[in-house]
Image: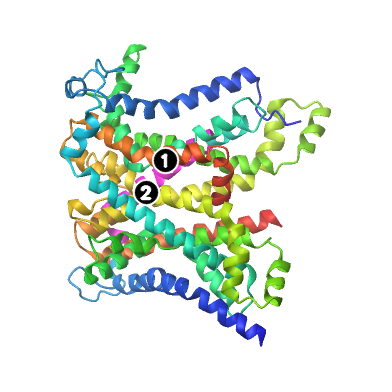
Amino acid sequence: MRERLFPGDRVAAYVVLVALGLVTVLPLLYMIVLALQSDGEVQSGDPVLWPAELQWGNFTRLFEAAPFGRFFVNSFVMAGAITVSHLVFDPLIGYVFAKLDFPGKRIAFVAVLSTLMVPFFVRMLPIYSIFASLGWIDSYQGLIVPFLMDAYGIFLMRQFIRPLPDELIEAARVDGAGEFRIYLRVILPQCKPAMAVLGLFTFVFQWNEFLWPLIATSRTEMRTLPIGLTLFNQEYFTQWNLTAAGALILFVPTAIFFVITQKFLVEGIALSGLK
Amino acid sequence: MIRRRQALTAWLFLTPAVLFFVLLFFLPIGNQLLTGLYDADGAFTGLGNFTRAFEDPEVLHSFLITLAYAAGTLVVGTAVGLALAVILNQSLRGRTLFRSVLLIPYLTSVSIIGLLWRNILDPQVGILNRLLEAVGLPGQTWLSTHPLATIVGITVWSSAGYTMVLFLAGLQGIPGLYYEAARIDGAGPWRRFFAITLPLLAPTTVFVSIIGLIGTLQQFALPYIVTGGGPGNATSLYAHRLFIVAFNDNDFGYASALSLLLLVVVLVLSLAQLRIGDRADA
């Protein structure tokens, strides 16, 4: 039996949960209402709980008012390329740290882990300067390269690979398989669930990334969706309906991610959060 | 022989990672150490940028409000996250759904969160004041009268689910036996909470606080989007000040020094967390 840790009864628990659940969800639902209002309704100064007529056209008008199609593509290229890179490198490096023995391993591992403590602000300015001299500002490589791998993903994969039985690797070695073949044929197929989690998390977090794309781009056509949306809002301040429509488009991957992972979301985040 | 081949393979596999971490982590940090020694005109100033930081009223202000922001977020956020975790650790119907729903803001882009709340809190078109007026409460000019507190509120709203998850993980580690024994001894639910749950969660609470502190010290995007650092410089947190020094004043030397000071604080906090974590495991 589970401990009733919360002092008080079941009803009180539900009251608190429903209240906080509503506080969490209602603002996001209001975003949908906002996106479907007419220009007159958003400018009237009277908040509208339900639009007189649902303005689905706002979603197409948005693409005419600003290059949101291009923002979407840019975000997709950035988040997609970074996700692919993580899926290629994180399991490989995680495998090296989990199963191979070699001189310098401890130092290399500590060096990778130590990067977790480095605030992005510390490496942001020099990377910006270098990329500026390379002509990489306003380029896809400029958006992508700083995030090709990270210590979180590597550590996550190492933790997942460590408990896999060594006998599998030994048997493959006896059969004469090379090290890369062992990784590709024996280890990688078992990593699929961990890689699915890693891939989904990487994509959603990069899709939402704000600071680096803000700095690494200045031309409108190279902006990503989160930046494009805030700039659009500053430029057309009163068009909250279009801003909300853009926010909904930005929210789509998060919603998909939520539906796919709902059952495992909490454990997944506990895993990545607790390292 | 096999060992040597394995070592060679290992370093071969590691080559991309070595390149990446050297070029995009360690060299940039080294570069910051050097850049921090030069002023905006490119003249060598030694530790001038660092001493300047300690005398700069703008930097001092940004540091102090960042501490206030961190303290507010930690106290309220930890309390809300802990309460949610304790409630959702019980066998309640719909538990999984509640847990997940509360995490949605954590997965949502800061652009959406910032713009959404700017709209909701707007004194002219915002819905929050109308709701308050509807139930007979006075409306507030949230972002002009209580800007920092409002930013704290939005931060708690967006991160409470994450804090909850960390506490849930901590709660799983408390043996049910303790509660059985306490119940046999006649301890009520409140007593059990304060005598068992809270003390045994201490390592998690420390972890949550330090992680939260490291995060809030680096907060940039939320005030940037919601208030632009204003009104005046009321919400110009440390990271925002650093950004302005770098990209508005184009003083990369000074900004480097500011980022190195941030690095020192974050390093100290991270190492403290590691040491406390080790002790909790032992």
Above-or-below relation of B132 to B281:
above
Regarding mark 2 in the picture, which secondary structure is present there?
helix
Q: Identify whether A75 is placed above or below B127.
A: below
| Residue A269 percent location from the top left of the image | 54, 46
Neighbor class of circle 2 (other Cα within 10 Å; few <14, some 14-19, many 20+) is many
For marks 2 and 1 on the same chain, the one whose residue lies earlier in the sequence: 2
Give me the chain letter of mark 1.
Answer: A
Examine the rendered structure and indicate whether residue A203 appears above or below residue B182. Answer: below
In the drawing, what numbered circle is on residue A207? 2
Amino acid type at mark 2: Trp
Query: Percent from the top left, x then y, of residue B223?
Result: 31, 43
Q: Which of the pair B70/A137 is nearer the observer?
A: A137
| Amino acid type, mark 1 | Thr
A55 relative position to A105: left or right: left
**Residue B245 in the image, given as x and y percentages of width and height:** 24, 58
Question: Label 1, on which residue?
Answer: A254
Q: Residue at x 64, y 43 (%)?
A: B170
Tell me where the magenta segment starts and ends, as one range: B53-80
Query: Measuring 22% from the left and 60% from the top, which residue is drawn there?
Result: A138
Q: Determine whether A137 is above or below B162 in the image.
A: below
x, y percentage for residue A250? 33, 40
**Dot 1 lies on which element?**
helix
Q: Quadrant of the C terminus of chain B?
A: bottom right
Determine the chain carrying the residue at label 2.
A
Farthest residue, direction bottom: B1
Name the residue located 56 percent from the left edge and 70 percent from the top edge: A109
Q: Are marks 2 and 1 in contact (CB under 8 Å)?
A: yes
Direction front: furthest residue = A175
Relative placement, left or right, of A57 versus A143 is left
Magenta span: predominant SS is: helix
Left-right relation of B172 to A241: right
